[in-house]
Image: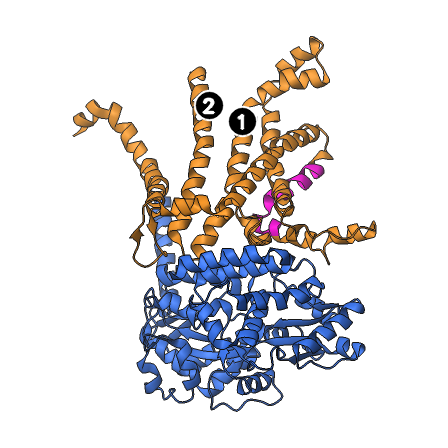
Chain colours: A blue, B orange
């Protein structure tokens, strides 16, 4: 019969299908209803990633039926994608910077208000010093996770070869730079391709020469970039630039690509954050020392740069309840502590004992000695101002003689943005 | 039912067949273009409420020195990119030899086609690295001071174009190789009998047959140079201080980093108008050829 073959094939196919269904069935409908939590994060360094993976695994173990997906992404590309995903496909939890960078999103109603969270989880007291950074219009939109300070990382071997000690004043710093330069070592390595590393010099000099109030005025657009006080900042900054103390062709390197110069002893110092340490292997780290930005004008108190990172829940998150639960879990001292340690940063809780051998204790000390702080140029001012400003600083580092043109351009931008 | 179909088949069939492509074209291409032009008249951060500001974005754009830097760089891109079809043709003529060994040589020249632009950008960034890059090592070997091409505001664009040209040449090479394989052997044989050889053969017999391919290669190259963005993003992020920015990158920078979707849309509109010139030229040429052919 001609029909027999197809019919048999059909039967066999049906049998196979039934078998497949039987096998697949137990997986298709599990006993406990699945809940998923999606986390987007830029804390993708090896240490912090490992810490995060452990916290997530513990959270899943403590909450049966919960499946957590963590999307890691590198810092620079995260910056370009976050606004899109907050609008188009919001995760349940998103890590981000606090301060003006958070407010850029809360202003656009992209982060959910989580004001009650602190009281419910008794976090008001331990997180008190960081709450201002996550507050907009009296409401809290993020949970601070950690903070870090900035300063000079130096190559200990190079310093001992030059016979110098970490400086306390700007003049001492310049003297060390001169010695290094004479010995054929680049005094300051820096990578300005992704712009921000260079803003540290501007931030520190502005605050140490003109004080915090002027700096914040500049960030809020009430002070001008053509002000004589800014001129003074650039005149101070110009000296090391014109003497050739900075790495040549800084804009050819990203901030990470400039670290090997320091590690290999080709450069003496790098003004940056703890990322210098996390970017280096364990053995190389031992040779790297740290000192805070030296005093520039003794009559101006030493204002530090303290950047607070946090985590928030996007307005469009599908699973806000679970997200809050996860944040509360992350906020537990041992979890927050492990998370911060993975990135050589300081956990954002005042009641956590910091390991005195860890770099976090150095940063904590720096904060204690500081007469006040701001976060970072691109977290304290309007995002567009920050972008244009940092381009201007990059240009100044390469062509210091264009100072006036740069400052006039920046002031025109400031007027347009803040009018 | 069947009768209605039969009576109107002549005009219904094209309608049915055209529906999907037309709908897709309208939805994915025409509509976003209109939307983008509309947005360019607004001040908008991309998510919040938008305010109508008329031509202010364009006024600002034409007073923005960055715009002219971008425009200048776009012109450099187009001019240098047009070398790609020339090099591509030269290479294709060289590689179009019936030798077995040529296959290996060909595959070497095809490599850039297999690589994503982003990877080409990263590789060339390392190549240009003024300390650890091969270029620097070679220059030091010959006793020259290494030259940081990506940090020099005058040369940075040339550095990026060179990387892009490497890939674009391979693309044109493939087009021309395909074109060469379609050559009419009889015409060439006839030419040879009439005593043509070398340059004359190329100029009067081969090149006329490659006209269509050359045309396509040129147009695609020009459009490719105008929309180039990825290499710049990877290699310099438009820097140093905006000196390697082209219009497409400036649009991205304004929209993504400065949160100015309106201003970005205005840049996109200008870029669209520039591209339209080439597209119009392309369409006119294609239509004319089709008319002649028919």
Rendered position, B76 above or below A167: above
Between B165 and A253, the residue placed more toward the observer is A253
Between B31 and A415, the residue placed more toward the observer is A415
Residue B65, image x, y percentages: 51, 47
Does the image show residue B63? yes
Q: Chain of mark 2?
A: B
Question: Which segment is the magenta one?
Answer: B104-121
Rendered position, A81 above or below B103: below
Q: Name the secondary structure under disc 1.
A: helix
State whether the magenta stretch is mostly helix, strand or loop.
helix
**Going by the picture, which residue comes out furthest to the front?**
A228
Within 10 Å of disc 2 (Cα), the crowding (few <14, some 14-19, many 20+) is few
- The quarter of the rendered structure image containing the N terminus of chain B is top left
Q: Name the secondary structure under disc 2.
A: helix
Q: CA distance from mark 2 to mark 1?
A: 9 Å
**Going by the picture, which residue comes out furthest to the top?**
B194
Residue to which mark 1 is pinned? B215
Within 10 Å of disc 1 (Cα), the crowding (few <14, some 14-19, many 20+) is some
Rendered position, A360 above or below B166: below
Q: Residue at x 63, y 72 (%)?
A: A271
- For the image shown, how many numbered marks are present on the structure? 2
The picture quadrant where one finds residue A190 is bottom right
Residue B142, image x, y percentages: 83, 49
Residue to which mark 2 is pinned? B285
Q: Residue at x 41, y 86 (%)?
A: A128
Q: Residue at x 40, y 79 (%)?
A: A132
Q: Are marks 2 and 1 on the same chain?
A: yes
Q: Are marks 2 and 1 in contact (CB under 8 Å)?
A: yes
């Amino acid at each position: 019969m001609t029909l027999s073959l197809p019919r048999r094939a059909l039967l066999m196919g049906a049998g196979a299908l039934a078998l497949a269904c039987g096998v697949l069935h137990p997986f298709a409908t599990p006993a406990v209803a699945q809940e998923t939590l999606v986390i987007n994060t830029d804390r993708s360094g090896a240490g912090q990633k490992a810490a995060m993976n452990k916290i997530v695994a513990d959270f899943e173990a403590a909450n049966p039926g919960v499946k957590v997906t963590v999307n890691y992404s590198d810092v620079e590309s995260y910056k370009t994608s976050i606004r899109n995903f907050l609008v188009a496909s919001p995760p349940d939890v998103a890590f981000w910077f606090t301060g003006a960078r958070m407010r850029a999103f809360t202003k656009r109603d992209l982060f959910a208000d989580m004001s009650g969270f602190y009281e419910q989880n008794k976090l008001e007291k331990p997180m008190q010093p960081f709450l201002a950074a996550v507050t907009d219009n009296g409401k809290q939109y993020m949970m601070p996770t950690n903070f870090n300070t900035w300063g000079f990382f130096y190559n200990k071997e190079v310093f001992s070869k030059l016979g110098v000690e970490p400086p306390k004043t700007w003049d001492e710093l310049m003297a060390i730079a001169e010695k290094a330069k004479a010995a054929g070592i680049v005094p300051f390595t820096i990578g300005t391709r992704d712009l921000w590393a260079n803003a540290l010099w501007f931030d520190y000099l502005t605050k140490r020469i003109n004080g915090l109030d002027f700096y914040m005025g500049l960030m809020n657009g009430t002070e001008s970039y053509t002000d004589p006080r800014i001129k003074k900042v650039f005149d101070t900054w110009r000296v090391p630039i014109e003497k050739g103390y900075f790495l040549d062709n800084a804009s050819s390197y990203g901030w990470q690509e400039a670290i090997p110069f320091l590690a290999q002893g080709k450069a003496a110092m790098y003004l940056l954050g703890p990322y210098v340490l996390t970017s280096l292997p364990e053995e190389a780290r031992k040779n790297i020392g740290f000192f805070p930005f030296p005093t520039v004008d003794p009559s101006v108190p030493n204002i530090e740069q303290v950047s607070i990172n946090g985590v928030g829940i996007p307005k469009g998150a599908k699973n806000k309840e679970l997200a809050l639960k996860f944040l509360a879990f992350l906020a537990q001292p041992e979890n927050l502590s492990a998370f911060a340690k993975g990135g050589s940063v300081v956990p954002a809780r005042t009641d956590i004992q910091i390991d005195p051998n860890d770099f976090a204790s150095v940063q904590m000390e720096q904060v204690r000695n500081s007469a006040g702080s701001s976060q970072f140029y691109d977290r304290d001012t309007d995002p567009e101002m920050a972008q244009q400003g940092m381009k201007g600083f990059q240009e100044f580092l390469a062509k210091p003689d264009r100072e006036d043109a740069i400052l006039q351009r920046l002031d025109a931008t400031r007027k347009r943005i803040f009018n | 039912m069947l009768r209605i179909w039969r009576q109107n088949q002549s005009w219904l069939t094209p309608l049915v067949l055209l529906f999907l492509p037309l709908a897709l074209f309208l939805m994915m291409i025409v509509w976003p273009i209109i939307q983008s032009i509309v947005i360019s008249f607004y001040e908008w951060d991309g998510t919040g409420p938008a305010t109508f500001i008329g031509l202010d974005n364009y006024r600002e754009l034409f007073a923005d020195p960055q715009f002219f830097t971008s425009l200048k760089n776009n012109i450099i891109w187009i001019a240098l990119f047009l070398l790609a079809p020339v090099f591509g043709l030269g290479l294709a003529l060289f590689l179009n030899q019936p030798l077995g060994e040529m296959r290996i040589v060909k595959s070497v020249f095809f490599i850039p086609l297999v690589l994503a632009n982003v990877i080409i950008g990263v590789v060339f960034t390392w190549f240009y690295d003024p300390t650890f890059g091969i270029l620097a090592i070679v220059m030091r070997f010959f006793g020259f001071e290494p030259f940081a091409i990506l940090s020099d505001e005058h040369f940075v664009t040339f550095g990026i174009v060179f990387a892009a040209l490497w890939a674009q040449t391979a693309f044109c090479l493939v087009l021309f190789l395909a074109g060469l394989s379609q050559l009419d052997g009889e015409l060439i044989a006839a030419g040879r009998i009439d005593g043509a050889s070398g340059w004359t053969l190329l100029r009067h017999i081969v090149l006329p047959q490659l006209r269509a391919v050359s045309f396509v290669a040129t147009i695609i190259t020009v459009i490719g140079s105008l929309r180039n963005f990825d290499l710049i993003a990877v290699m310099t992020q438009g820097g140093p201080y905006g000196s390697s920015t082209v219009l497409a990158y400036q649009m991205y920078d304004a929209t993504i980093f400065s949160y100015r979707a309106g201003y970005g849309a205005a840049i996109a509109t200008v870029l669209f108008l520039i591209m339209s010139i080439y597209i119009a030229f392309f369409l006119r040429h294609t239509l004319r050829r089709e008319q002649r052919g028919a």
